[in-house]
Image (cartoon, helix red, strand yellow):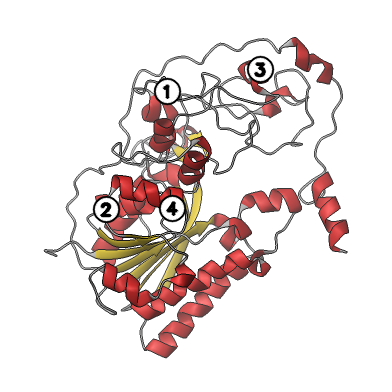
Amino acid sequence: MDRKPVLISLYSGAGGLDYGFEEAGFRTGVAVEMDHDCCDTLRANRTFPVIEKSIFDVPTGDMLAAARTKRGKLDLVIGGPPCQPFSKSGYWARGDTKRLEDPRAGTLGAYMRVVEEALPRAFVLENVEGLAYTEKNEGLTLVLDMIEQINRRQKVHYIPSFRVLCAADFGVPQLRYRLFLIASREGQPFSFPSPTHASKNETAQQTSLLALPPYRTAWDALGDLRVDPSEELEMRGKWARLLPSIPEGENYLWHTDRGGGMPLFGWRRRFWSFLLKLAKDRPSWTIQAQPGPGTGPFHWANRRLSMRELCRLQTFPDDVHIQGNDRAIQRQVGNAVPSLLAEILGRAVRTQLLGDARSREPLHLMPPIRTPVPPPEPVRPVPQEYRSLRGVHHAHPGTGKGHRAVAWAEEAQ
């Protein structure tokens, strides 16, 4: 393939998918994104056209014209429709969500509208793993039904393959699970790449012949970075002074009757990311898009993560600089797809579906291994102002049975 295959990017956000497919040899013909901060980021870092509008307000013909291609000639459509109706956070808070009743779920149909009107050679749809939860997969079922309808109306043969992937399994220094659905117009089957990395425990259990390299770690991603003095990274809020009393790799559960600290909270009474701290020798947990002041993961130095650190954990190229204030930066990076995972999938799409025999050159966005890993930071005593919380705290009664879930259920009756 002499030319770079061209893609249209929908719901582009800060460009996590785009940067990865770019490293895999694609050219972004146009990005469609309605968030102003995201559009500023895309324009500041890349030269491809950006349409700053809702996808509902952009005719597919305008996208094709901006990408300098035509219906049926486009190589690829990529994108991750907004995922809030299917996110794990909704299940934790309510025990369930409105899902397809949520108007934001209509973005799935808008994505498939572009697929039908552009008829690309292939498409990649990304979403949260909750889209495919057992017995709660009506969103995925809707997409599969729409694909069948497109095939029937347009006389094409999109055969979807989908899988939930853990980004850490492919070298991303972050435990992040996302659903990917990939289909070829001509019906070629797509085989997802096999994991290239494993946790230390899994690696130790395998034979030496089959052992995979261990997960890339937060230290691999961040070990060479220094804090920019212009960034205000001090933790804020009522729990800020408690964070230094939690060891690396732990969260508020450290301070429960089942942890190793002081019993200040009930078991699982808070969301997992509350007072969650990175460990140097492990991958990061999922970067949050809209964290509260006590929501991690936090740096092992007891502070918030910098813009560059957030980008490293998402394996963005180092030439990418996120635009906007602190909240806008966190939202953009937290909503993104790890670019290394996109690069790996992009190479597989080119090889399997577009007939391009890619060379086995090293992955461009793979973090280096940094050794030795420094020892954990020292843990400080619990400050006096929190010690009044010490006592007996009841554990959470279970999914959908917490105070907020019960209140919402009563309101719905």
> Callout 3: 10 Å neighbours few (<14), some, many (20+)?
some
Amino acid, disc 3:
Arg
Residue under the point 61% across and 26% down? 250
Question: Which residue corresponds to mark 3?
Answer: 241
Question: Which residue corresponds to mark 4?
Answer: 13
Question: Which residue corresponds to mark 1?
Answer: 230
> Separation of disc 3 and disc 1 at Cα?
22 Å
Apparent side of residue 3 relative to residue 375 in the rendered image (left or right) = left
Residue 182 percent coordinates (x, y):
40, 66
- Quadrant of the image containing the N terminus: bottom left
Amino acid, disc 2:
Glu
Residue 315 percent coordinates (x, y):
37, 40
For residue 357, above or below residue 278: below
Apparent side of residue 203 relative to residue 95 in the rendered image (left or right) = left
Amino acid, disc 1:
Ser
Tally of numbered discs? 4
Q: Tag 1 or tag 3, which sits nearer the N-term?
A: 1
> Callout 2: 10 Å neighbours few (<14), some, many (20+)?
many
Residue 272 percent coordinates (x, y):
65, 37
Question: Which residue corresponds to mark 2?
Answer: 22
> Separation of disc 3 and disc 2 at Cα?
42 Å
> Separation of disc 2 and disc 1 at Cα?
31 Å
> Separation of disc 4 and disc 2 at Cα?
15 Å
- Nearer to us: label 1 or label 4: 1
Residue under the point 37% across and 68% down? 123
Residue 344 percent coordinates (x, y):
32, 51
- Nearer to us: label 3 or label 1: 1
> Separation of disc 1 and disc 4 at Cα?
25 Å
